[in-house]
C-alpha cells in the first residue's frame, strides 16, 4: 500500500464536518440601521441599486465588467451607487481574472457580464477562482423575465428555447446560483448568494433579468437590514480531543516541523499558524502555493517546501522530520512534483479548514483550523531541534555570475535586481511558467504581497489578476512577471490598467515560447510568433494616460530600466520587455518539468 502523501491525498472533505450551533453568535457585515422605504425615491429603491449596496456592504468598491445588451440597464443602476466604481474590461475572461485578483486582496470580488456569450467567456476565470477558494460574485444580465417558459429563441444563445445552458455550466464552478426573474424574492436571492460566497469562500452566480434592474420594489430600501453570517464554530469537545491527540503525537517526536498550505487563506488562520510557530519553536516552511501567507522574516522560517525543487536545505529538514504539521495543504501533481514527495502519512498531522487528521488515522471534524492552532499553541512543548538542524546545515546561496558588459542578460542575474526592488510597498504577481520558480526564490520582506495561481494554472491569468489586485490596493506598486506566451492570451487589458491610472511594473519575459511546456514535453507547438511587445503597449497607450516602455537585453540596461521605473516614472505604468535566451530556465523548472512529464507519461494500469 502506498503511504506517500505526495501520491494520494487521503484527507478528502466530508460534508458533515462543519456545524454551527443555531445559538451561535452572529457576525454582521454592515452596521447601518434600516430606514423606511417610504422616504426613498424610486430611483434608489430599484433591484439594481439594492444589488449595488449589497456589494458595497460586502467589501466590493470596484466591479469589473463588459457591457452587453442584457446588462446595460443593470450597469446604469450599479454605477449610480456613489461607492461603487465600474472598471470596464476588454473581455470577459480578463474581467473574471480581475475579480479573482481583487478578491485575493480585498477578500471578495465581483464581475458583471451579459447572458451566455459573456457568461461562457468568463467561465474559465470563475473556475480558477473556485479552485483557489476565492469569493467572486459573477453577475450576469439575463433575459427579460417575460421570455422564460415561452418557447422563444433569443440571441446570445445556441438557438434553442432553453435558457438554462449558462446556468448548468456555472453549477459546477460556483457554490450557489441565483436566477432572479421576479421581484418578490429578488432581495432574498441576492442576499443568500452574496452571503454564501463569503461563507464558503467560493464564487457564486447571480443572473438578473434585464427588465427588472430598474424596477422599484418595497423590499429595496435605501439602507437594507444588515444581512448576517452565522459564524462557524468549533465543536468544543472535538477541539479538545483533537488537541490532546495531537499533543500526544507531537510530544513523542524528536524533530517536528510545520508547513503552511494554501488553505491558510480560506481558513483565515495565518496568524494562528504563526502563533503556534512562536510557541513551539518548530522549523516553519510553506508550500509553494502558500507563499505570501506566512511571514518570511519569521526567525524560524526555512523556506518553500516543494519536494525536489524546494529552496535550499528546506526539503532535507521537512522530509527527515519524524512529525510534520501540514496546514491546509493541496497535494496535487504540481505541488508534489509529479507525486514524488518523500513524506509518510503516518508522520503527518494534516489540518484542513474544518478538520484534523492525525497519522493517517483519527480524524476530528467540526474543528476549525484557527481554533486548533490557537489552542495547540497554549499547550505545545517547545522543540527547536529541526530548526537547529537547519541552522547547522544551512549554507548561504551563492550569487549568480555578474553578466559581462553587453553579455546577453540571464534570468538568474535579473532576479538579483528584482530582489532589491521588493518592499512592504510592493506586491508580486507571478504568471504560470518559469516565473513560478524564479519568484518563489524571492525573499519577501514584511508586508510584501505575493500571488500566483498554482492549482488551476491558467496561462494569461496574471494580466487580469494584476489589474484587479492593483485596483484593490492602489497604495502598493504591483510587480508582475509574465511570460511572452501567457501575455499573448490576455494582453488587451493593459489598456484598462492605463485607463485607471495604475502604476504597475510589468516585466515581460520574452524567451520565444511556452518554456514551462517545453520542459514537460517539447514540440514545434511551443514556439510562438514573436511580437514587438513594447510597440504593442505603446499602441495601446496611444498618448492617453501615463505609460513608459523599454526593451532590455543586457544587465546594464535592466539596471537603468529599474532605476527609471522606480524614480522619474514611479507614477506611470512601466512595461519592461526582458529579452532572454529561449533555453534560459531555472534549474527548478528543469527538475520539476522532467518529474511532471514522468507522471503524465505513466502507462495505463493493466486491466
Image (cartoon, rainbow, N blue to C red):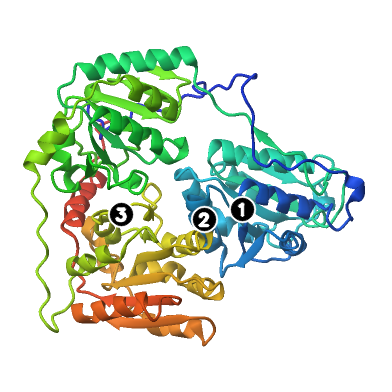
Q: Residues within 10 Å of mark 3 (few under 14, many from 20)?
A: some
Q: Residues within 10 Å of mark 1 (few under 14, many from 20)?
A: many
Q: Which quadrant: the N terminus?
A: top left
- Check the image and report above or below for 51 versus 525: above
Q: Is residue 188 left or right of residue 534?
A: right
Proximity of marks 2 and 1: CB atoms separated by less than 8 Å: yes
Please give the count of numbered marks on the rendered protein. Answer: 3
Give how far apart the Cα atoms at labels 2 and 1 are: 9 Å
- Image spot of residue 34 (x, y percent): 80, 41
Q: Residue at x 38, y 41 (%)?
A: 262
- Nearest to viewer (mark 3 / mark 1): 3
Q: Residues within 10 Å of mark 2 (few under 14, many from 20)?
A: many
Q: What is the quadrant of residue 449 in the picture? A: bottom left
Whether residue 165 is visible here, answered yes or no, is no
Q: Which quadrant: the C terminus?
A: top left
Residue topped by disc 1:
60
Q: Secondary structure at mark 1?
A: loop
Residue topped by disc 2:
102
Q: Is residue 181 left or right of residue 173?
A: right
Q: Residue at x 27, y 20 (%)?
A: 359
Give how far apart the Cα atoms at labels 3 and 2 are: 22 Å
Instruction: Looking at the image, tell me whether mark 3 or mark 2 is earlier in sequence order.
Output: 2
Nearest the viewer among 339 and 104 is 104
Which disc is residue 445 wearing?
3
Amino acid at each position: 500500500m502506498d503511504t506517500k502523501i505526495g501520491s494520494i491525498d487521503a484527507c478528502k472533505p466530508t460534508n458533515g464536518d462543519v456545524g454551527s450551533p443555531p445559538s451561535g453568535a452572529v457576525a454582521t457585515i454592515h452596521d447601518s440601521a434600516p430606514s423606511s422605504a417610504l422616504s426613498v425615491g424610486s430611483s434608489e429603491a430599484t433591484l439594481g441599486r439594492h444589488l449595488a449596496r449589497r456589494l458595497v456592504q460586502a467589501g466590493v468598491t470596484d466591479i469589473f465588467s463588459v457591457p452587453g445588451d442584457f446588462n446595460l440597464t443593470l450597469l446604469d443602476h450599479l454605477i449610480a451607487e456613489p461607492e461603487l466604481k465600474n472598471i470596464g474590461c476588454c473581455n470577459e475572461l480578463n474581467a473574471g481574472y480581475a475579480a479573482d485578483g481583487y478578491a485575493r486582496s480585498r477578500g471578495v470580488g465581483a464581475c458583471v457580464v451579459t447572458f451566455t456569450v459573456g457568461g461562457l467567456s468568463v467561465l474559465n476565470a470563475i473556475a480558477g477562482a473556485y479552485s483557489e477558494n476565492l469569493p467572486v460574485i459573477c453577475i450576469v444580465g439575463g433575459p427579460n423575465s417575460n421570455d422564460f417558459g415561452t418557447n422563444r429563441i433569443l440571441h446570445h444563445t445556441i438557438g434553442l428555447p432553453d435558457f438554462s445552458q449558462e446556468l448548468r455550466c456555472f453549477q459546477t464552478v460556483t457554490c450557489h446560483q441565483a436566477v432572479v426573474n421576479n421581484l418578490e424574492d429578488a432581495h432574498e436571492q441576492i442576499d443568500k448568494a452574496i452571503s454564501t460566497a463569503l461563507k464558503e469562500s467560493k464564487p457564486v452566480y447571480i443572473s438578473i433579468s434585464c427588465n427588472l434592474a430598474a424596477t422599484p420594489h418595497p423590499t429595496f430600501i435605501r439602507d437594507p437590514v444588515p444581512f448576517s453570517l452565522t459564524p462557524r464554530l468549533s465543536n468544543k469537545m472535538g477541539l479538545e480531543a483533537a488537541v490532546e491527540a495531537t499533543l500526544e503525537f507531537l510530544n513523542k517526536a524528536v524533530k517536528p516541523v510545520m508547513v503552511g498550505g494554501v488553505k491558510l487563506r480560506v481558513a483565515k488562520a495565518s496568524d494562528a499558524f504563526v502563533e503556534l510557530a512562536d510557541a513551539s519553536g518548530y522549523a516553519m516552511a510553506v508550500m509553494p502555493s502558500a507563499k505570501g501567507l506566512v511571514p518570511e522574516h519569521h526567525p524560524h522560517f526555512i523556506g518553500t517546501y516543494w519536494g525536489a525543487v524546494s529552496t535550499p536545505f528546506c526539503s532535507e529538514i521537512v522530509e527527515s522530520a519524524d512529525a510534520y504539521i501540514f496546514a491546509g495543504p493541496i497535494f496535487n501533481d504540481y505541488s508534489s512534483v509529479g507525486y514524488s514527495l518523500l513524506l509518510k502519512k503516518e508522520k503527518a498531522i494534516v489540518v484542513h479548514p474544518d478538520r484534523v487528521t492525525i497519522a493517517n488515522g483519527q480524524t476530528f471534524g467540526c474543528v476549525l483550523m484557527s481554533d486548533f492552532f490557537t489552542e495547540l499553541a497554549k499547550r505545545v512543548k517547545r522543540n527547536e531541534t529541526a530548526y537547529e538542524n537547519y541552522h547547522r546545515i544551512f549554507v548561504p546561496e551563492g550569487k549568480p555570475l555578474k553578466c559581462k558588459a553587453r553579455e546577453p542578460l540571464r534570468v538568474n542575474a535579473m532576479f538579483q535586481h528584482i530582489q532589491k526592488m521588493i518592499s512592504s510597498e510592493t506586491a508580486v504577481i507571478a504568471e504560470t511558467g518559469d516565473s513560478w520558480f524564479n519568484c518563489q526564490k524571492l525573499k519577501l520582506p514584511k508586508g510584501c504581497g505575493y500571488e500566483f495561481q498554482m492549482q488551476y494554472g491558467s496561462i494569461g491569468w496574471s494580466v487580469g489578476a494584476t489589474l484587479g489586485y492593483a485596483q484593490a490596493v492602489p497604495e502598493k506598486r504591483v510587480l508582475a512577471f509574465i511570460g511572452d506566451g501567457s501575455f499573448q492570451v490576455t494582453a488587451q487589458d493593459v489598456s484598462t490598467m492605463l485607463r485607471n491610472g495604475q502604476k504597475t511594473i510589468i516585466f515581460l519575459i520574452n524567451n520565444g515560447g511556452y518554456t514551462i511546456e517545453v520542459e514537460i514535453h517539447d514540440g514545434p507547438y511551443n514556439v510562438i510568433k514573436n511580437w514587438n511587445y513594447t510597440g504593442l503597449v505603446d499602441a495601446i497607450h496611444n498618448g492617453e494616460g501615463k505609460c513608459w516602455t523599454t526593451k532590455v537585453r543586457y544587465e546594464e540596461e535592466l539596471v537603468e530600466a529599474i532605476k527609471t521605473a522606480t524614480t522619474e516614472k514611479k507614477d506611470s505604468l512601466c512595461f519592461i520587455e526582458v529579452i532572454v535566451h529561449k533555453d534560459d530556465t531555472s534549474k527548478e523548472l528543469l527538475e520539476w518539468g522532467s518529474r511532471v512529464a514522468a507522471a503524465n507519461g505513466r502507462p495505463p494500469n493493466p486491466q
